[in-house]
Structures are given as C-alpha cells and as structure tokens.
Image (tube, rainbow, N blue to C red):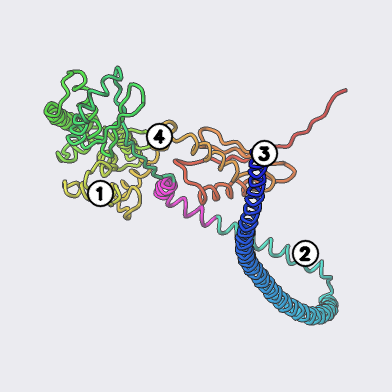
Amino acid sequence: MNILSIIIAIIAFIVGAVLAFAIQKILLKSKAASIIAKAEEEAEATKKEKMFQAKEKFLQMKSENEKLINERNNKVAQAENRIKQKEASLQTKFDEVQRKQQELASQKEILTNQIQLNEKKAEDLEKLHKQQVEQLETISGLSAHDAKEQLIDSLKAEAKTEAMSLINDIMDEAKMTANKEAKKIVIQTIQRTATEHVAENTVSVFHIENEEVKGRIIGREGRNIRALEAATGIEIIVDDTPDAIILSGFDPVRREIARLSLHQLVSDGRIHPARIEEVVEKTRKQVEEEIIETGKRVTIDLGIHGLHSDLIRHIGRMKYRSSYGQNLLQHSKETAKLCGIMAAELGLNAKAAKRAGLLHDIGKVIEDDGEMPHALAGMNLAEKCKERPEICNAIGAHHEEIDMESLIAPIVQVCDAISGARPGARREIVESYMKRLKDLENIALSYPGVLKTYAIQAGRELRVIVGAEKVSDSEAEVLSMNIAKKIQEEMTYPGQIKITVIRETRAINYAK
C-alpha cells in the first residue's frame, strides 16, 4: 500500500511536472510571439524613421547640389558675357587700328608725292639760280666769289670810317662832361650791388649752473614760468638741453628784459610770481634807460646833433637787433661813416649823408610798422620827427621802394651794401654758402671751352680757365661778359663778383 501510494505520488508528480512544463512552454511561446511582434513593430518604425531621414538628407543634398550647379552656371554665364564684351572691344579696337593704318597709308602717299614735288621744284630753282648767277657774271664781268670779296672789303672800309667818326664824337663829348658823368657812372654802377638779406634772431639762450634751477624757475604746477611769460611776453622753453633755458620771442628787447630778469631772479634765489613781476618791471625800466643812453652815445660819437628823442630811442633799440648775424647798430654806424667819407669825396654834404646813413635801417626797430617795408616805415618815422626831405628820401629809397631825389640817396644805398657785403660782416648758413659757390662754378662750366672754374675769396671772385685752342682772346672777353650777365640774372648774392677768364698756351717738351 505504501509502495502504491509512492508510485501514484511519483506518477502524479511526473504528470504535474509534464503539465507544468507544457504550460510553461505555451506561455513562453506566447511571450516570445509578443516580443517578436513588438520587435517587428519597433523595427518597422525605425525603418520608416531611417527612410524618412534618408529622404530628407537626399532632398537637402539635392537642393545644395542644385544651388551649386546654379552658381556655377551663373559664373559661367558671367564669364561668357565678359568674354563677349572683350571680343567686341577688341574687334572695335582692331577696326580702329585698321582705319588708322589706312589713313596713315594715304597720308604717307600724299607726303611722298609732296616730297617728290618739292624736290623737283628745288632742282628747278637751283637751275634757275645758276642761270641768273651766270647772267650776272656775264653782265658784270666778275665771278660770284670776286663780287662777294669786293662787297665785303667795301663794307669793312665804310664800317671802319663810321666807327672811327663815332668814337671821336663820343670821346669829344666825354672830355666835355668827364667829371660830372664819371661821378654819375660810378654811383649808378655800384648801386647794382645793393641787396638785402633779412634774417632775424628770435631765440636767446640763458645758461644756468645746474639742473635744479630749472625746477625753481618752473615753480609749483608751473606758476613761476607762467608768471614770467605773462610779465615779459616771451616764451620760456625748459627742455632736456643741459644747463640752458631757451627764451623765444620776435622782439629782441623783450628777450633781453627776460634774460636780465632771469639772471637777477636766479642770483637772488627768491622766485615767486610777485617777485617776478617786480623784477621784470625794474629790469624793463633799466633797459629803456640803457637804450636811450646808447642812442645818445652813438650820436655823439658820430657828431650828429639835433635828433628827435624818439629817433634817439630807436637808435638805441638797434643794439638788440641783428641781420644775418651783423648787429644792426654796428651796421648803421659803419654805414654812416662810409656815407660821410663818400659824400666828402664827391663834394656833397657829409653831415647830411652821415645822418641818413645812421637812420637808414631805423624802420627795422619800429614796433607797430605792420606790413610796411622797413625803408618806408623808417621814412615815415623820420618825417614825423621833422627830418629834412632829402634825409627822409634817402631812408625810404635805399631799397628802391620810392624814387631817389638827391645824390645822398644812392650814397646811402651803396654804403648799406658795402657794409653788409664786406667779408665777415654777415653770417651765412654753411649749406647755402656752399651751394652758392657751387652754382657760381656750374654757371661758368656750362659754357663751351671752359676747362676749370674756381670760386675764391668767399665767392667774390670767379676764375675761369679756358682752353687756348678752343677760345680766342676776343672770345675770352665776350665769355667773361656773358658769365657776368648770367650770374646777375640767375643768382642773388651780396656785393659784387669779379669774373676773371684765364687763357694761356703751354708748350711742353722733354730733354732725353
């Protein structure tokens, strides 16, 4: 019984296991079928999505490709248009060139015909000329060469006779008016040397002992230097220049006042705005007194009396003015002495000439002359101060702004040029000086036959060496005149330049 129960139990267990297995298998198949169906659905959805993306990508690529093709087509079309335009332009130019060639060919043919016609006419004229010459020789009994020689001899003799007669008449007239004409010619000749070169010094340098003084002059926040510039009217430049301060201004008297004021302030050590104004005012009065004293001393030294006080003050101001490095007061004194000497030699009023010579450049120191030339400004000042008319005219005419009315005027002009043109009187910039000498030599070298040129005596003499086989004695004289004329026309220079043409013949042999 127990065994049977066990067998039944075993069989029931086996049947239960088989049924469970069968049920589980059925369930697994059902689950697998659902999973497969779901996977197939997902695969189908993924497939559709991928196909949609591929289609979009295809459409995008197709659009880009079409756009690229259109751009290339447009470029090709533009290139074709440009080529067509160039072809049309080239065709037009080609047609124009052909037309011009045809015109040139026709003109060439016309010119060739005209040349042939002219040659034929020239031959006919030559034949006609020969016939006329032969007829004249037959009628006169002389050949053309003999007739030419006789005509030249006749003209030479006639010219010599007329020239000798004219020379005798000129010499007789010159003997009658020799003294008067000699003075006039000398004065007119040396007037040509009068030139003017004006270059004003606008900068003064104030030297200091050390760099610490610069800070004291500038002051806190620049108040000292501003006060000094306001009081003097001079620009004060404090830069990296060692141991120096630059004073810049067009008025030399103001620069002198600024320089003396700075010297006193630095020496005293007290530099502040109130002290600066006090010192500048005191220095201005001292300078004005010194200007008047200087003017008085100059007039006494030259023996000139009765000058107006305003003229004396302006003469003193000349001490602080310069022209080309030449002090204006020294230049005026020198001109006055030269005028006195020349006037005495010519038998004129030496005192009046000396007076005009001293005052001739006084217009350069007038403060409010505006745009008027200094000669006319000086003349107006002299007229206000009741100077004589001949003195005023000499002042105004020494640079030919007005006509000269007396012999004193050209004397002043000449002596002004002599004082300014003498060697060492005025300073020249080295570059301009070298250029002037080089230009002098180049002018002479431009003439044929000139071998060498030398500018000597600071450019006041030009020596020209010519080839003896190329230039004769008479041609050397003409060459000297031509060079002098060309220098006068093309160059500006102080004084006068002597042109010496040297022509020599050298014979060289060697003893062996």
Mark 4, residue position: 426
Residue 512 visible in rendering: yes
Q: Which mark is residue 327?
A: none
| Residue 308, horizontal then vertical, whole percent | 15, 41
CA gap, disc 3 and disc 2? 188 Å
Mark 3, residue position: 3
Mark 1, residue position: 377
Q: Nearer the viewer, mark 4 or mark 3?
A: 3
Q: Main secondary structure of the magenta part?
A: helix
| Residue 290, horizontal then vertical, whole percent | 18, 29
Query: 255 or 437: which is nearer to us?
Result: 255
Query: 156 or 492: which is nearer to us?
Result: 492
| Residue 147, horizontal then vertical, whole percent | 79, 69
Q: Nearer the viewer, mark 2 or mark 1?
A: 1
Q: Determine whether 198 is above or below 68 in the image.
A: above
Q: Are marks 4 and 1 in contact (CB under 8 Å)?
A: no
Label 3 amino acid?
A: Ile
CA gap, disc 4 and disc 3? 160 Å
Label 4 amino acid?
A: Arg
Which quadrant is home to the C terminus? top right
Q: Determine whether 132 is above or below 16 in the image.
A: below
